Image (cartoon, rainbow, N blue to C red):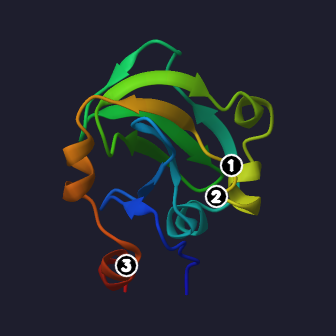
Amino acid sequence: MSKLVEGLYYSKSHEWVKPLEDDVVLIGITDFAQSELGDVVFVDLPEVGNTISQEDEFGAVESVKAASDLIAPVTGEILEVNEELVGEPELLNKDPYENWLLKVKLENPDELGNLLNSEEYAEFIK
């Protein structure tokens, strides 16, 4: 069973969203995603200042088994990129909830309503 964290929002493309404050969120990949990928060897992330749009591709994660596109769970401006993952992509395998990908200022906070809660996501990945 994959680890889930209460209080996060989950997308069907296996990204999570953690609300911070002032409509700022962290985005990462789920434990289910990293376990399906296997050993992560490369993370391709967008530039700070770029805008991501809900349901659009914003980067990729590559493992020894496969490459997987990252799909934006929300729309907003990228405030920060987790640079640590560029040098140590395997951190995603160690703890995908501690090792976020992006910090984003939401354009439309109502988009969070399009995502799943932990119970719904658990049902989705069964």
Q: Looking at the image, is mark 1 or mark 3 earlier in the sequence?
A: 1
Task: Say which residue label 3 marks.
Answer: 125
Query: In which image quadrant can residue 115 be found?
Result: bottom left
Residue depicted at 34% across the width and 40% down the height: 72
Q: Nearer the viewer, residue 51 or 25?
A: 25
Query: Residue 5 location in percent, x, y?
Result: 54, 72
Judging from the image, what secondary structure is the residue with disc 3 in? loop
Residue at the farthest top position: 49
Q: Is residue 77 left or right of residue 100?
A: left
Q: CA distance from mark 2 to mark 1?
A: 5 Å
Amino acid at circle 3:
Ile
Q: Which quadrant: the C terminus?
A: bottom left
Mark seen at residue 99: 1
Query: In which image quadrant can residue 114 be found?
Result: bottom left
Amino acid at circle 2:
Pro
Query: Residue 9 location in percent, x, y?
Result: 38, 61
Residue depicted at 32% across the width and 85% down the height: 123
Mark seen at residue 64: none
Vertical placement of residue 60 versus 39, above or below = above
Q: CA distance from mark 1 to mark 3?
A: 21 Å
